[in-house]
């Protein structure tokens, strides 16, 4: 039991190392852009001196060259014609051979002019399949003022691991002909067996003569792949750094649990230690012996945790294959494994020092006592009290510094880095003060939390008394629970604030699922057809106009906010949004700061494209950011009419009438049919960006709460361990209660309630710390969101933790109930 927390911590730490190695190796093996068969990569500046067809033929004739693959365009993006704002990336690839990056999964690879294969992403996102035709728009040429659209036939669908976007593939020469470009920026070369990339480089250099400053580069395939591996690792560096922070918290929790456990274990052996003192053992000898015991526990637990994590790391690829995914094996990081084992030893030795020092001071007179343990201490010394109060004062002082430097709403120049660092530092000081002052906080919290249990009769009263009788022990366990609850509750509040901020950002950038717009204007007939589509809801047309306020230019819209459900997410920085009307406008934050506008001010608006007079309006409200559709100002339609704006609508916003991707796809097709293929209108699917943002927040919440679950797991282990050791320590007391008439079920219930009380005390303290600090971080981040309080989620966390900690005491309670009253009363404490 004393090694369980350390074992879990070692398993998680080394398991994270294994996960990182698996991730990096998988990225390198499957997501790299250079095939494993590439021996040499030759690259040249495509603008100054691209690689020519003649140079490619010369390379193919060099002895030792087995295969050559030219690359072109390198993922350059080109738009497609049609009502949707769609685009596709293009990459040159041979499509077959050892140097191919793609594999054909449907149809055939292009082998003729104006043919293209697309990857799975393009086939799915653009709804195209083999046999379809698409029109790709290429940039203007030097002798033309218009862009050139080329119709190509899709011949197949390919799979390319390195792709994340819609991409089209064809031989490099075919793509050069489509784009009307010459030369290639890169050659991948495969050498024959026995020929190294370095040797091949020496043979090929004379073939590429370039002017100074435009020389071709020769890099071996191994060097290119190593650089790709480094870049792949950098992609996940920030994620694993964040994970490291959470792991550090989990290791701290494990150390606190271990320290509390060792303190109880050593307290149970005080008579034995006193006897050793009686026969001549010195304090230093006892201290070293107890520290060595802790080191041995850390060695065994750390080794077991590392071995379990190693097995899990090697089992992961096998489990992934059963799910149709491919993961690389992690290897055996021997030095890292040794470091984790050594760290486990250091953690346990550090945790055991204070309990060992206390236990080594056992008086020889205790050897004459009938009790093998001593009662839990109820108070703390003056030094500990002073230290705790000092730490609390420092934490409060740092909070005062933060409040003195909070930004104004909408202040984009505020740097939150310093504020966040000070907030985290203040939280660390608060937690340290909680560790020091915990025994003093347990009693008042227990008075309130234990009140319902006392109403349940003698069993509840005994449970409350059992926890309150050893406040230092209760504080040691509850502090770990409080740490987990504070982090989880703070994360829930922070995620709720981030979600609120993202909802407000979506109300600006993506106020509806779809936006059909035309720079020349949409006629009333098109607007009417869109409004009558059964697949759509909340169809709202709008105008956009460039206006002037003195010498300042801005963009205004007459969007009807109440007609869009997303407008409920807009929170004004000043004034009231409902005050919008004729002669009253809503101003975005940037324009308000630029012109120093506040609610109630009057300004004169003029239309930039018209010669009419101005319209005087007052500021009804200001926003902490931009207005919807990224406009600077929202005005009433009648004011735009007075300014001389066109009656044609710039666009129309609409939502799908039902939720789900299928309903959204049907609505999208309905809009395309209504607007017509030859229409100049463009349809933007705004819901996709909103879904991506929400998915990112859900992923962040899942990862964060999953990692914080480690701390909660440590807390539960601590509760179970402490309860188990307490049951062993109070065996005679349990027998006496049984002899007085308390049944086995009553004894189990009492011990379970004691364990649950540890969770309740920690939960109350954790919520009292986690929620305010989360609010403080939201204010420092200046995300423009109100301070949220997800009551339901926090209540679920509190109740679940109380139940889980209560369940953690079931096994010790069952063990206590199995002892007969006569046998229990015959033992000594």
Image: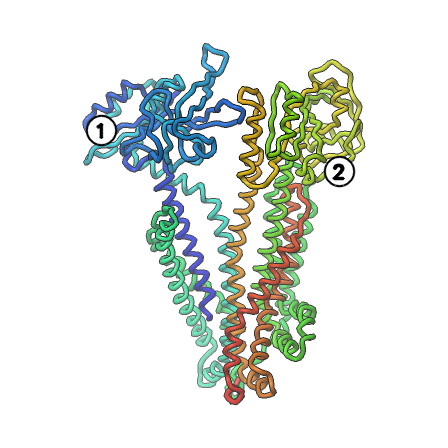
Q: How many marks?
A: 2
User: Who's the residue at 66% across and 67% down the image?
Assistant: 441
Q: Nearer the viewer, residue 786 or 530?
A: 530
* Residue 588 x/y as whole percent: 70, 32
Q: Say which quarter of the image contains residue 157.
A: top left
**What residue does disc 2 label?**
574
Which one is nearer the viewer's eye here, 567 or 398?
Answer: 567
Q: Is residue 607 left or right of residue 773?
A: right
Q: Quadrant of residue 210?
A: top left
Identified at 53% across, 56% down, the residue is 708
Q: Is residue 329 left or right of residue 568?
A: left
**Which type of secondary structure does the marked residue at label 2 adopt?**
strand
Image coordinates for residue 343, horizontal then vertical, percent = 43, 60
The span from disc 2 to disc 1 (Cα, nearest Å) is 71 Å
- The answer to whether residue 690 is visible is yes
- Mark 1 and mark 2 in contact (Cβ < 8 Å)? no
Crowding at mark 1 (Cα within 10 Å: few <14, some 14-19, many 20+): many
Tag 1, which secondary structure? Answer: strand
149 vs 281: above or below: above
Mark 2, other Cα within 10 Å: few <14 / some 14–19 / many ≥20: some
311 vs 690: above or below = below
Q: Which x, y percent locates residue 820?
A: 51, 86
- Say which residue label 1 marks: 65
Q: Does residue 662 appear to the left or right of 448 in the view shown?
A: left
- Residue 807 coordinates in the image, percent (x, y): 54, 69
State whether residue 150 is above or below residue 369: above
Residue furthest top in the image: 143
* Vertical relation: 246 (above or below) 48: below
Say whether disc 2 or disc 1 marks the residue closer to the N-terminus. 1
Asked if residue 213 can be seen in this view, the reply is no
Instruction: Specify how the rendered protein is coloured.
Output: rainbow
Q: Nearer the viewer, residue 116 or 670?
A: 670
């Amino acid at each position: 039991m004393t090694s369980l927390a350390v074992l879990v911590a070692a398993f998680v730490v080394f398991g994270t190392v294994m996960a990182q190695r698996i991730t990096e190796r998988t990225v390198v093996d499957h997501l790299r852009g250079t095939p494993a068969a590439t021996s040499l990569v030759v690259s040249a500046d495509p603008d100054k001196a691209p690689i020519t067809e003649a140079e490619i033929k010369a390379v193919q004739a060099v002895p030792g060259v087995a295969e050559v693959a030219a690359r072109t365009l390198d993922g350059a993006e080109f738009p497609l014609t049609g009502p949707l704002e769609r685009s596709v990336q293009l990459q040159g690839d041979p499509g077959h051979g050892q140097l191919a990056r793609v594999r054909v999964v449907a149809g055939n690879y292009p082998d003729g002019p104006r043919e293209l294969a697309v990857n799975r992403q393009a086939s799915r996102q653009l709804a195209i399949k083999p046999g379809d035709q698409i029109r790709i728009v290429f940039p203007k040429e030097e002798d033309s003022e218009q862009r050139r659209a080329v119709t190509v036939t899709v011949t197949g669908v390919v799979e390319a691991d390195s792709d994340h976007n819609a991409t089209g593939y064809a031989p490099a020469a075919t793509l050069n002909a489509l784009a009307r470009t010459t030369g290639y920026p890169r050659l991948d070369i495969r050498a024959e067996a026995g020929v190294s990339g370095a040797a091949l480089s020496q043979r090929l250099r004379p073939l590429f003569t370039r002017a100074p400053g435009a020389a071709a580069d020769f890099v071996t395939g191994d060097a290119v792949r190593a650089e790709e591996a480094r870049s792949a690792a950098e992609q996940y560096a920030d994620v694993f750094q964040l994970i490291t922070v959470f792991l550090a918290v989990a290791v701290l929790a494990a150390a606190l649990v271990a320290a509390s456990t060792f303190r109880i274990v050593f307290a149970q052996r005080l008579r034995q230690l006193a006897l050793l003192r009686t026969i001549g053992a010195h304090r230093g000898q006892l201290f070293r012996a107890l520290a060595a015991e802790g080191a041995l526990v850390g060695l065994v637990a750390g080794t077991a945790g590392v071995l379990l994590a190693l097995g899990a790391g090697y089992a992961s690829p096998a489990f992934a294959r059963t799910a149709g995914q491919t993961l690389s094996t992690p290897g055996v990081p021997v030095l890292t494994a040794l470091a984790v084992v050594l760290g486990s030893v250091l953690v346990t030795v550090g945790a055991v020092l204070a309990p060992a020092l206390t236990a080594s001071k056992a008086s020889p007179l205790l050897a004459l006592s009938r009790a093998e343990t001593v009662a839990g201490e109820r108070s703390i010394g003056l030094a500990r009290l002073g230290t705790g109060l000092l730490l609390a004062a420092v934490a409060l002082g740092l909070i005062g510094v933060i409040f003195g430097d909070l930004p104004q709403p909408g202040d984009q120049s505020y740097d939150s880095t310093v504020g966040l660092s000070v907030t985290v530092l203040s939280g660390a000081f608060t937690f340290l003060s909680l560790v020091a002052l915990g025994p003093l906080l347990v009693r008042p919290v227990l008075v309130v939390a234990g009140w319902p249990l006392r109403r349940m009769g003698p069993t509840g009263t005994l449970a409350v008394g059992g926890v309150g009788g050893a406040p230092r022990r209760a504080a040691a366990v509850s502090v770990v629970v409080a740490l987990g609850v504070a982090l989880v509750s703070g994360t829930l509040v922070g995620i709720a604030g981030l979600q609120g901020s993202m909802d407000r950002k979506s109300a600006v950038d993506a106020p509806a699922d779809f936006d059909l717009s035309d720079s020349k204007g949409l006629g009333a007939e098109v607007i009417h057809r869109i409004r009558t589509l059964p697949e759509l809801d909340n169809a709202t047309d709008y105008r956009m106009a460039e206006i002037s306020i003195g010498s300042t230019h801005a963009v205004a819209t007459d969007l009807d906010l109440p007609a869009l459900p997303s407008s409920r997410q807009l929170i004004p920085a000043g004034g009231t949004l409902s005050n919008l009307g004729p002669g009253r406008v809503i101003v975005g934050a940037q324009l308000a700061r630029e012109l120093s506008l506040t609610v109630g001010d009057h300004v004169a608006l003029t239309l930039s494209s018209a010669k009419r007079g101005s319209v005087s309006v007052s500021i009804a409200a200001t926003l902490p950011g931009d207005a919807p559709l990224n406009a600077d100002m929202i005005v009433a339609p009648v004011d735009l009419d007075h300014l001389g704006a066109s009656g044609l609508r710039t666009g129309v916003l609409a939502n799908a009438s039902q939720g789900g991707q299928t309903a959204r796809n049907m609505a999208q097709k309905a809009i395309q049919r209504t607007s017509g293929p030859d229409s100049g209108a463009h349809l933007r699917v705004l819901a996709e960006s909103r879904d991506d943002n929400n998915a990112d927040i859900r992923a962040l919440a899942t990862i964060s709460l999953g990692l914080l679950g480690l701390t909660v797991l440590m807390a539960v282990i601590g509760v179970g361990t402490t309860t188990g050791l307490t049951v062993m320590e109070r065996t005679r007391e349990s027998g006496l209660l049984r002899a007085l008439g308390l049944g086995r079920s009553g004894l189990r219930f009492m011990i379970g309630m004691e364990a649950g009380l540890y969770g309740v005390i920690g939960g109350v303290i954790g919520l009292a710390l986690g929620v305010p600090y989360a609010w403080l971080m939201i204010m420092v981040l200046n995300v423009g969101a109100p301070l949220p309080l997800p009551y339901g989620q926090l209540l679920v966390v509190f109740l679940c933790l109380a139940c889980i900690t209560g369940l953690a005491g079931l096994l010790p309670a069952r063990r206590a109930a199995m002892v007969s009253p006569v046998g229990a009363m015959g033992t000594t404490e």
